[in-house]
Image: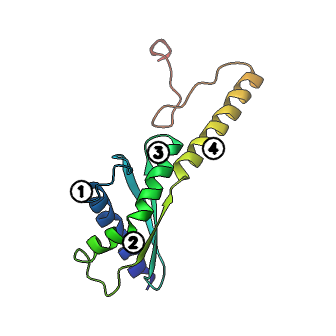
Amino acid sequence: MEHRVERVGALLTRELSNIIKHEVKDPRISEFVTITEVKVSKDLQTARVYYSVVGDRAREQTTGKALNEAANFIRVKLKPRITMRYIPTLKFFLDESFDNAERIYGILKKIGDEKKEKDGGPEVPAGPDGEDEKKESDK
């Protein structure tokens, strides 16, 4: 049953992206909205739709409010696109994983910079293949 839930989530992600991009004409919804994930309940009755928006916090909140207000319209548009007995109730949530990842990266970078300063001397950065980069004159 879990495999079906995952497949329905993937299908909803694809279809919701298309509907929001091409059929929802609300000016409050950013052009740069991306559906990042859809988590469907085991009974396939509700779907938590996670989205991200390029822009500031106000734009993210405005887009989220507009998406939640358009949820029933989007469900009606979903009906002919997917063959399910019941179209899940949609609830939209801002995906903050990118912000969290960026914050964690910043913390790790700060720790790394502090460690370099403490050790006294620049550390040779690793190249894309994992080996230390060396100057042409060192080779």
Question: Distance between the Cα atoms at labels 2 and 3?
Answer: 26 Å
Question: Distance between the Cα atoms at labels 3 and 1?
Answer: 19 Å
Question: Distance between the Cα atoms at labels 4 and 3?
Answer: 23 Å
Q: Which residue is mark 2?
A: 9
Mark in front: 1 vs 2: 1
Give the residue at x 40% y 78%: 88
Mark in front: 2 vs 3: 3
Q: Taking the image as drawn, is residue 24 in sight?
A: yes
Q: Quadrant of the N terminus?
A: bottom left
Q: Which residue is mark 4?
A: 104
Q: Which residue is mark 3?
A: 59
> Under tag 3, what secondary structure?
helix
Q: Which residue is mark 1?
A: 22
128 and 41: which is toward the camera: 41
Question: Distance between the Cα atoms at labels 4 and 1?
Answer: 35 Å
Q: Which mark is residue 101?
A: none
Q: Earlier in the sequence, mark 4 or mark 1?
A: 1
Residue 32: percent from left, percent from top? 36, 46
Q: Earlier in the sequence, mark 2 or mark 3?
A: 2
**Dot 3, crowdedness within 10 Å: few (<14), some or many (≥20)?**
some
Q: Earlier in the sequence, mark 4 or mark 3?
A: 3
Q: Is residue 28 above or below residue 47?
A: above
> Under tag 2, what secondary structure?
helix
- Report if the CB atoms under discs 4 and 2 are less than 8 Å apart: no
**Dot 1, crowdedness within 10 Å: few (<14), some or many (≥20)?**
few
- Report if the CB atoms under discs 4 and 1 are less than 8 Å apart: no
- Report if the CB atoms under discs 3 and 1 are less than 8 Å apart: no
